[in-house]
Amino acid sequence: MPGPLRIVRTPLELTAAMEAWKRAGHRVAFVPTMGALHAGHLALVAEGLKHADKVAASIFVNPKQFGPTEDLERYPRDEAGDGAKLLAAGCELLYAPTVATMYPPGFASYVRVAALPDLLCGAARPGHFDGVATVVSKLLAAARADVAVFGEKDWQQLAIVRRMADDLDLGTQIIGCHIVRDDDGLALSSRNLYLTPDERARAVALPQALSRAREALLAGGDVAPALATAERKIAGAGFARIDYFELVDGERLTPLRAVTPGARLMAAAVMGSTRLIDNLAV
Ligand code: PAF
């Protein structure tokens, strides 16, 4: 039985706790999150436990990855509830720093991965992935874990973090974890809480369009008509805007005109005022 969840709030405390585990012979995993945890996050902890015998997680709503008109203020926060869920999932250490700890006065260093952040979500969210790369590099530098686990729902984020961890020799292996979906197929997301019941019911058109496009492509259909049919389905379900629906190379994220190994369908669309993303391997 794991003991009570230990909470640390500074990078030094996190490093000390992780290093103590490693000195005791443990392999350690780290799961970065922004809190408001759902079953998708707990799957990250479970994945961590497949690769390590100790798991630490972080909860930090990172202001640097929110645009000026985005939902930083209303982003759900529930440290006590998150802590209980993490403990039940087998996580033993929680890193929950304040904004002032992460970005003290005078903070001036940013991490920017070239090219990948400008594609797909980056086009609609300028600066978002620089904020992600910056905070993830800080978290991984303090955690010094053997492995870190990220969800495949944010496939572009995962690709960027992999590139960055490789390029900067961060010494932590980046592991992707499968998308967890509700019974009707909608990918779990903390932002699903914003959907009204009617919007929630219509949002399922997004994963459905991905599945149908995948079937069409695997049946030998051309890419352009498969994507156009998917976009019509999403628009027909009442999404206010489609940011993209594309077939891309899963690593470089560049558009494909035909299915190749590692190809991935990627989608982002706005339902009501909530931007939803999803993706599917083809
Ligand atoms: O995926 C998230 O929850 C965030 O983007 C992350 C990786 C924790 C960085 O703030």
Image (spheres, rainbow, N blue to C red):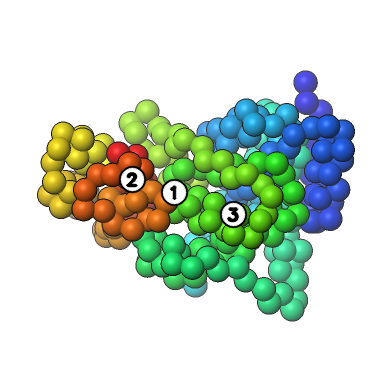
Instruction: Name which residue lies at 66% across and 56% down.
Output: 169
Q: Is residue 84 visible?
A: no
> What label does residue 264 carry, if any?
2
Q: Please rate how many residues cluster around mark 3, counting C-alpha atoms within 10 Å: few if below 14, some from 14 to 19, many from 20.
A: some
Question: Mark 3 highlights which residue?
Answer: 166
Instruction: Name which residue lies at 59% across and 45% down.
Output: 174
Relative vertical location of residue 26 with respect to residue 97 in this rendering, above or below:
above
Cα separation between marks 1 and 3? 17 Å
Q: Is residue 85 left or right of residue 113?
A: right
Q: Amino acid at mark 2?
A: Arg
User: In which quadrant is the N terminus drawn?
Assistant: top right
Instruction: Name which residue lies at 63% across and 48% down.
Output: 32
Q: Counting residues from the N terminus, which is met first, the one under dot 1 or under dot 2?
A: 1
Indicate the position of residue 167 as horizontal and vertical percent values: 59, 59
Q: Counting residues from the N terminus, which is met first, the one under dot 3 or under dot 2?
A: 3
Q: Amino acid at mark 1?
A: Trp
Q: Please rate how many residues cluster around mark 2, counting C-alpha atoms within 10 Å: few if below 14, some from 14 to 19, many from 20.
A: many
Question: Is label 1 or label 3 in front?
Answer: 3
Cα separation between marks 3 and 2? 22 Å
Question: Mark 1 highlights which residue?
Answer: 155
> What label does residue 10 carry, if any?
none
Q: Is residue 18 left or right of residue 79?
A: right
Q: Is residue 32 visible?
A: yes
Indicate the position of residue 17 as horizontal and vertical percent values: 84, 44
